[in-house]
Structure formats: structure tokens, C-alpha cells
Image (spheres, rainbow, N blue to C red):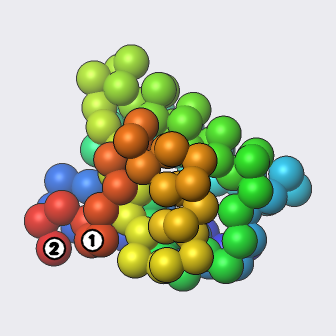
């Protein structure tokens, strides 16, 4: 898994390439923790270049949403990848997470 960090408008954007699984999910969790500890409370996780995500990865997304929301921030999950979008739809996470085709402000 590779993580890229950029900024779009008010959002810190974490782009995730490769696979999010039980071995790589802690890196994503730590990236979100790091941003929130720096006071960056608007975070977008871009799953468009992601090839695979298991239940551990989905748990990280839910945890990130909770962490940011509890601190007064917000999480946007960007997903233009049909395979990952289908996973979010099938699990019902498209109703829990703010899933969009692009980062707000792009």
C-alpha cells in the first residue's frame, strides 16, 4: 500500500494506492491520527486508486470518521473506483460515510 498526502481547499487528502488489509490498515489509521493531532480536521481519503479493501480497512474508515467527528471535524471518502464503490454500497457504508466522486472544492 502506498499513501500520498496533498491538500485540496480545506481538505487534507490521503490517496491510497494498492491494498488496504490487516497488514497495511494500521498505516492508514496512523496517517489519520497524525493529521488530526496536527489540527487538520477536514480529511478526505481517496480510494479511487485502491485495488482492494478488506474488513480491517473498512473498520479504519469508520474509526477515522468517528475520530474526526468527535473532534469537530469531518471525513470524506472519495471513490470513483467502481469495485471499491460497490463494496461500500454492499456493506451499507455508503449510508454511514460521506462518499463522493471527488474531493469537495475540486
Marks 1,2: beta carbons within 8 A: yes
| Farthest residue, direction left | 105
Above or below: residue 39 compared with residue 30:
above
Quarter of the image for residue 84 reads bottom right
Distance CA(mark 1)–CA(mark 2): 7 Å
Above or below: residue 26 compared with residue 86:
above
Q: Give the residue displayed 70% in from the left and 62% down from the top.
A: 53
Compare residues 95 and 38 and report the one nearer the observer: 95
Q: Give the residue displayed 63% in from the left and 42% down from the top.
A: 60
Q: Secondary structure at mark 1?
A: loop
Q: Which residue is mark 1?
A: 102
Compare residues 81 and 39 and report the one nearer the observer: 81
| Farthest residue, direction right | 23
Compare residues 51 and 26 and report the one nearer the observer: 51
Label tally = 2
Q: Secondary structure at mark 2?
A: loop
Residue 77: image x %, image y %? 40, 56
For disc 2, the neighbor class at 10 Å (few under 14, some 14 to 19, many from 20) is few
Above or below: residue 23 compared with residue 71:
below
Using the image, tell me which numbered label, if any, was put on residue 106: 2
Amino acid at each position: 500500500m502506498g499513501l500520498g498526502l496533498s491538500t485540496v481547499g480545506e481538505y487534507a487528502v490521503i490517496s491510497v494506492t494498492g491494498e488496504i488489509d490487516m497488514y497495511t490498515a494500521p498505516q492508514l489509521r496512523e496517517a489519520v491520527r497524525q493529521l488530526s493531532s496536527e489540527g487538520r480536521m477536514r480529511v478526505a481519503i481517496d480510494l479511487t486508486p485502491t485495488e482492494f479493501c478488506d474488513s480491517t480497512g473498512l473498520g479504519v474508515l469508520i474509526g477515522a470518521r468517528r475520530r474526526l467527528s468527535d473532534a469537530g471535524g469531518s471525513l470524506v471518502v472519495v471513490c470513483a473506483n467502481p469495485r471499491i464503490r460497490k463494496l461500500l454500497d454492499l456493506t451499507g457504508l455508503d449510508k454511514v460515510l460521506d462518499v463522493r466522486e471527488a474531493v469537495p472544492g475540486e
